[in-house]
Image (tube, rainbow, N blue to C red):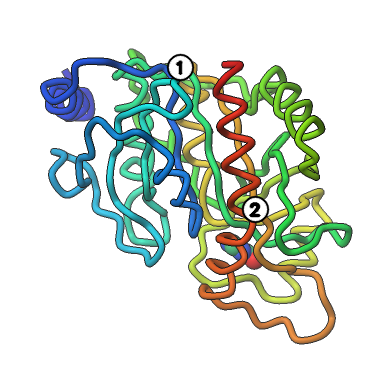
Amino acid sequence: MSTLLQQLNETVAFIQSKITTTATTGIILGSGLGNLAQEIKVDLAIPYAEIPNFPVSTVEGHGGKLLIGELGNKKVIVMSGRFHFYEGYSAEQVIFPIRVLKLLGVETLLLSNAAGAVNPNYKVGDLMIIEDHISFFTVNPLMGKNESSLGTRFPDMSEPYSKALIDAATNIAATNNIHVHKGVYTAVTGPTFETHAEYRLIKTIGSDVVGMSTVQETIAACHCGMKVFAVSVVTDLGIREDNNTITHEEVLLAAKEAEPKLTLLFKELLQVI
Ligand code: HPA
């Protein structure tokens, strides 16, 4: 058995030894978007530091706990805090928890993130349902030996984000008067925010927003056959000619303000999954 499979089995056995029920939906909350976790009726919270083989999240705004419980009467497993490539983890480490979720029985993954908009029609605080992504400015987490018991060597990526879930979320947003965009997320490694020229390039290649997470997780989820739904909260505008400085604090603040819309969307979506 490969080292990866051994580690996955060890981690899954550890978590299973602590829980009595399983969930088929996993949720990963992005920077400044951890408050959804407070709405969860938590049966069990396991700090990442206690989970064998889990990396430990270091970034401000990330809780760093695996929560198992219920959201609106639906069982969920929530990663409150995620692992970013820019923190120094390998891409394989970043996606390790996704594979753990899969082996715990998760079939659908809901992701949120903070992102910078390069679409000039977007405003700070807007939500964008991710329809597609561009992964070329980050590292593909499937590089290296393929673990064929998880998925195929050359995964199809023609529908990385479930069309059915996008349609369902679009209807939910309309019913609840939540304005949503639908667009393309481009992944960068970070941790630097983009230069003017980089934002222009990212816009030119067909992106609407840019961010430092989500895509590696989505690739891993597709590889092992999970459905993915992801939303970006626009926390800053990359394309603007005036003062273009961006700080992490500004990102966290904008995310916090937009969060109630995202929470509602996720909660309602859970009801139809
Ligand atoms: N660029 C990259 N990542 C981000 C941004 C951005 O402008 N905003 C939030 N995450």
Spot the residue most to the bottom: 243
In the image, ligand 1 is in what quadrant? bottom right
**Label of residue 107 in the image:** 1
* Residue at 57% in and 16% down: 273
Circle 2 residues within 10 Å: few <14, some 14–19, many ≥20? many
Decide which of 20, 148 is in the foreground and name it. Answer: 20
**Label of residue 233 in the image:** 2
User: Is label 2 in a helix, a strand or a loop?
Assistant: strand
Percent x, y of residue 37 = 40, 44
The reply, left or right, for residue 49 in relation to residue 216 is left
Image height of 216 relative to 253, above or below: above
**Distance of mark 2 from mark 1, alpha carbons?**
24 Å
Q: Report the label total.
A: 2
Q: Going from the N terminus, do you reach mark 2 or mark 1 first?
A: 1
Percent x, y of residue 258 = 64, 56
Amino acid carrying mark 2 in the image: Val
Q: From the image, which quarter does the N terminus lie in?
A: top left
* Residue at 24% in and 53% down: 56
Image height of 82 relative to 74, above or below: below
Numbered disc in front, either 2 or 1:
2
- Name the quadrant containing residue 97: top left
Decide which of 155, 37 is in the foreground and name it. Answer: 37
Amino acid carrying mark 1 in the image: Glu
- Name the quadrant containing residue 43: top left
Percent x, y of residue 242 = 82, 85
* Residue at 22% in and 27% down: 8
User: Is label 1 in a helix, a strand or a loop?
Assistant: loop
Circle 1 residues within 10 Å: few <14, some 14–19, many ≥20? some
**Label of residue 85 in the image:** none
Query: Does the residue at mark 2 contact the one at mark 1 (Cβ under 8 Å)?
Result: no
